[in-house]
Image (tube, rainbow, N blue to C red):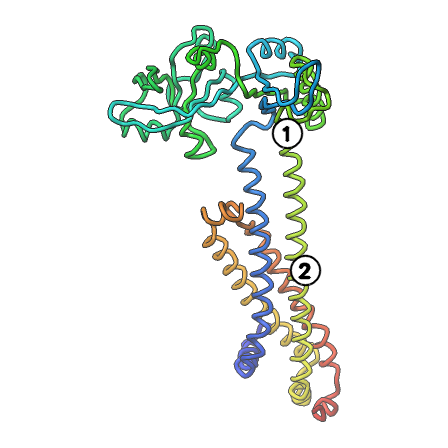
Amino acid sequence: MFSRDTWKEIFEAIGKNKLRTFLTGFTVALGIFIFVTLFGMGNGLNNTFDLFFGEDAVNILKIEATQTSLPYAGYKAKRNIEFDNSDLAAIEKDFAPFLDYLTPKISRRNLITYKKNSDFYYTRGVAPGHLLAENSLMMKGRYVNTQDLKDKTKYAVIGRMVEIDLFEGEDAMGKIIDVDGSAFKVVGVFQDEGGDNEERFIYIPYTTRQFLEGNEDEFDDLVVAFRETLGHAGAVKFEKQLLSYLKQRKDISPKDNRAFNVLNFADELKKNQQFAGALQIIISAIAFAVIISGIIGISNIMLFVVKERTKEIGIRKALGATPKSITNTIMLESIFITAIFGFLGMLIGVVVLNAISGETLEEGYFITKPGINVGLAVFVTILLVVCGAVAAFVPARRASKIKPIVALRDE
């Protein structure tokens, strides 16, 4: 089967039928190329979901107090709702078995100045737990701590990009920055997986922010971290119980669903994982449908090829070629063509995925680092080669059984 004469015959057949060889190979290469790119794009979508939810902890509720939409308990609708520090103490007491930590979040946009450099940044008044909620990592120094909250210290924890922008290579630790006229000492520098934008925030104790604004205990946003052991179902139940509790404390109608904006990361992660999984299944089904259509295409081409070579097969049999050698030669030719063009299509697909990967694809189509497992790509390519061999075997076997006199009469 692997004799020199056999390979010489194969290359002669390929040389005489360049168009047919190209069409067969093109069908194979196109099928593999489409599979690789489609499957890679599906993986890119999954990467986007993982990246989005990987930036923050997933066992948290983010609750924003807004306005009521219904009148209740003597209050009119469109009443502004605000949290206060007593709500923190009450939640910590009544939901202690379910909690990891709580942190308010007071966001303001401030002019930050260091020496001659200044720019506008968002400051966030937070508690120590916010470091865990954001999945941030301390590069230098420390984060806001409980003693800072008690003393209402003017300490600031700045992002990596803030240090780069304002300090221009100078170490920010221990330096004094001006926050809209108030002097803060830098006690820490953090980095964040969310990228440059997340690293342009400045964190200060929330009690300090309340003090600076002359408002001793009010805030708008609350971050609640629940125990991961609750699971998805427990997280959804906990959310309902906590919202019902807050509505009672704030005299809000139980039917009012607009007084709070709630983001349950565990619930959102579950829904998006299900969506991403379904989308990947659909994309995979389409990709495999392309492979199947490629196999059908190869089968049709090989049927035509063998039919076209019936007279040639008759001559070879008349000269003494055995049915097995005829079958093996045709199959080997099919395997050779499908293997060469199959791996070529795979390589082109991988190159295209690497070429289109970048910010444009991420921002415009939410596809992050599209790619495919090399093992899977090779497996599918080999599968198509095997199917090409099977597609060639059936008509080749049939042709090899034709009597030479019948084959020579074929038109």
Q: Count every numbered label the image shows and give the total.
A: 2
Circle 1 is placed at which residue position? Answer: 266
- The mark that comes first in sequence, 2 or 1, is 1
Nearest the eye: 408 or 343: 343
Nearest the eye: 267 or 251: 251
Q: In the rendering, at what x and y percent does residue 242 appear?
A: 67, 18
The quadrant in which the C terminus is found is: bottom right
Q: Nearer the viewer, mark 2 or mark 1?
A: 1
Residue displayed at 53% across by 17% down: 219
The quadrant in which the N terminus is found is: bottom right
Q: Mark 1 Cα within 10 Å, few/some/many (few <14, many 20+)?
A: many
What secondary structure is found at the residue carrying circle 1?
A: helix
Q: Amino acid at mark 2?
A: Ala
Q: CA distance from mark 2 to mark 1?
A: 34 Å
Circle 2 is placed at which residue position? Answer: 289
Q: In the rendering, at what x and y percent does residue 338 appear?
A: 59, 68
Vertical side of 339 occupied by 300: above or below: below
Q: Amino acid at mark 1?
A: Ala
Q: Quadrant of residue 100?
A: top right
Q: In the rendering, at what x and y percent does residue 180 appear?
A: 35, 20
What secondary structure is found at the residue carrying circle 2?
A: helix
Q: Is residue 170 left or right of residue 200?
A: left
Q: Mark 2 Cα within 10 Å, few/some/many (few <14, many 20+)?
A: some
Residue displayed at 43% across by 12% down: 208
Vertical side of 108 occupied by 151: above or below: above
Q: Is residue 205 left or right of residue 240?
A: left
Q: Quadrant of residue 2?
A: bottom right
Residue, far left: 116
